Each structure stands twice: as C-alpha cells, then as structure tokens.
Image (cartoon, helix red, strand yellow):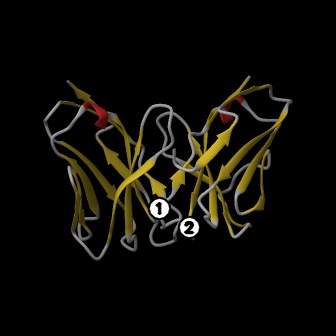
C-alpha cells in the first residue's frame, strides 16, 4: 500500500521568512495530493491541493509543487505570519484507491 | 466553523463503559468518515460511509461500531475499549467521495482509563 513520508516533523521560522515542507510517496498511481492545516483545538482544514496533471499551484502566499517522476511534493509558504503556526499534513489518494493516506504532520512555529 | 459538529468534545470512560460519539454535518454532503488521530502518528481512516452505506472498514476492532442513520448524522459506538484507544476522533464529510474536499469537525478527545 501507499506510504507517505513527511519532513521535517517540526519547523521554526521567523515572521516574514519562507517555510517549506516536503513529502514523498510510494505509489506512482497516486493522482491527488491535498494539504491540510490543523490549528490547536480544531480539525484539519484543506488549504491547497494539486492533481497529477499539473506541476505547481499557487494561492496567495501558499504554493504546492509536484514532481511525479521523483514521487515527491512540497508545500511552500512565503512571508510567514504568526497565524500560520499550526500542524500541516500532506496526503495522497493512496495510489488512486480514493481514501486519503496522510503523512505524520509538520508542526510549524512562526516567531514574531 | 466548518459545518461539521461533533459531540461530546471530551470524553473520559472506563474500559467497561459503553458510550457513543456523534457527528452532524449541515453541508448536504453524501460521504462521511471517522478518523483516529494519535500523537506522532498519521491520521488513520477508520470508516467511510457513502450515501449511508458503509464502503470502508479499515480493519478496525469490533469494539468500535459505526452507525449512519442518514446522510447528515454519523455515530461511533464504543464498548470495552482499551487505554491505547485514547486519541482524538475526527469526523469528516465530503460532497461525494474522499478526493473531494473533506471538511473536518473539531474532534472528540477520548481518554480510556
């Protein structure tokens, strides 16, 4: 079955810096790659997703890149703000099977 | 608010108790999910319901029993749990299936003594 590895597990940046979180997956048949943000005391919330027919997608300060050949995808946050502090999860559609397979999460701390 | 509510938010129970978790979505979605979130582990999918029919049981022990009486409500019945079942239990819904955007509730923090 699909295996999703996420790095780093914790990331601390200064406000205004960029943050990058990387994920690798094992099943080349995976086609859907969503990223979720989980704030303290809340459930995960989708922040951006990408499908295998594109290599990059942007939404304001957030971007996701996908390299299907290397089987890795990354989340990029620019001009970080304290409210970006949260746990971020990458996921895939488990080799096209449908149900999401999640990474272990990255705890991002943005210091003012 | 995501439109998905869960009750209770916190639950402490003994290993011999029987309790139920409730999830309700007001989004008109047809698919609902139960996930288990434990520290330092990925979110684990437990059950999937699509149009009130269970389509996935991810090798979950029988001490967890789901129920979906209609497309807006989802329950997780708990009995004779173990301390290792202590975790955050998250409910989610999506319009049709898992590769649509999933909307999560805030979760129920379960502690088994």
**Please, which residue is most extreme toward the bottom here?**
A53
Residue A110 image point, x, y percent: 24, 30
Name the image quarter holding the C terminus of chain A. Answer: top left
Q: Which residue is mark 2?
A: B95
Q: Residues within 10 Å of mark 2 (few under 14, many from 20)?
A: some
User: Dot 2 lies on which element?
Assistant: loop
Disc assigned to residue B77 = none
Residue at 30% x, 34% y: name it: A83
Query: Is residue B26 rendered to the left or right of residue B63?
Result: left
Q: Label 1 neighbourhood size at 10 Å, few (<14), some (14-19), many (20+)? A: some
The answer for how far apart the CA atoms under marks 2 and 1 are is: 8 Å
Residue at the (36%, 50%) spot, across then down: A5
- Provide residue A56's location: percent of width, then percent of height: 21, 65
Picture coordinates of residue A27, whole percent (x, y):
40, 67
Indicate the quadrant where residue B113 lies. Answer: top right
Q: Using residue A96 as the reference point, say whether residue B5 is left or right of it.
A: right
- Residue A19 appears in which quarter of the rendering? top left
Residue position for label 1: B101
Asked whether the residues under the numbered discs 2 and 1 touch, taking CB atoms below 8 Å apart as contact, a structural biologist would say yes
Q: Earlier in the sequence, mark 2 or mark 1?
A: 2
Residue positioned 20% across, 49% down in the render? A61
- Secondary structure, mark 1, is loop
């Amino acid at each position: 079955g699909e295996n999703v590895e996420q790095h780093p597990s914790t990331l601390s940046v200064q406000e205004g810096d960029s943050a990058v979180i990387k994920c690798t997956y094992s099943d080349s048949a995976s086609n859907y790659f969503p990223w979720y943000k989980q704030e303290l005391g809340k459930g995960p919330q989708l922040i951006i997703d990408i499908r295998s027919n594109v290599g990059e997608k942007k939404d304001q300060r957030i971007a996701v890149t996908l390299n299907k050949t290397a089987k890795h995808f990354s989340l990029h946050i620019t001009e970080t703000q304290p409210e970006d502090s949260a746990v971020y999860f990458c996921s895939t559609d488990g080799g096209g099977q449908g149900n999401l397979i999640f990474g272990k999460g990255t705890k991002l701390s943005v210091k003012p | 608010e995501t439109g998905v509510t869960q009750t209770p938010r916190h639950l402490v129970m003994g290993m011999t108790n029987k309790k139920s978790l409730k999830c309700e979505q007001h989004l008109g979605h047809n698919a609902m999910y139960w996930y288990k979130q434990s520290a330092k582990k990925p979110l684990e999918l437990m059950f999937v319901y699509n149009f009130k029919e269970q389509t996935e049981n991810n090798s979950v022990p029988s001490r967890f029993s789901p129920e979906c009486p209609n497309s807006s409500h989802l329950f997780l019945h708990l009995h004779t749990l173990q301390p290792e079942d202590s975790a955050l239990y998250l409910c989610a819904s999506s319009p049709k299936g898992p590769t649509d955007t999933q909307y999560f509730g805030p979760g129920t923090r379960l502690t088994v003594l």
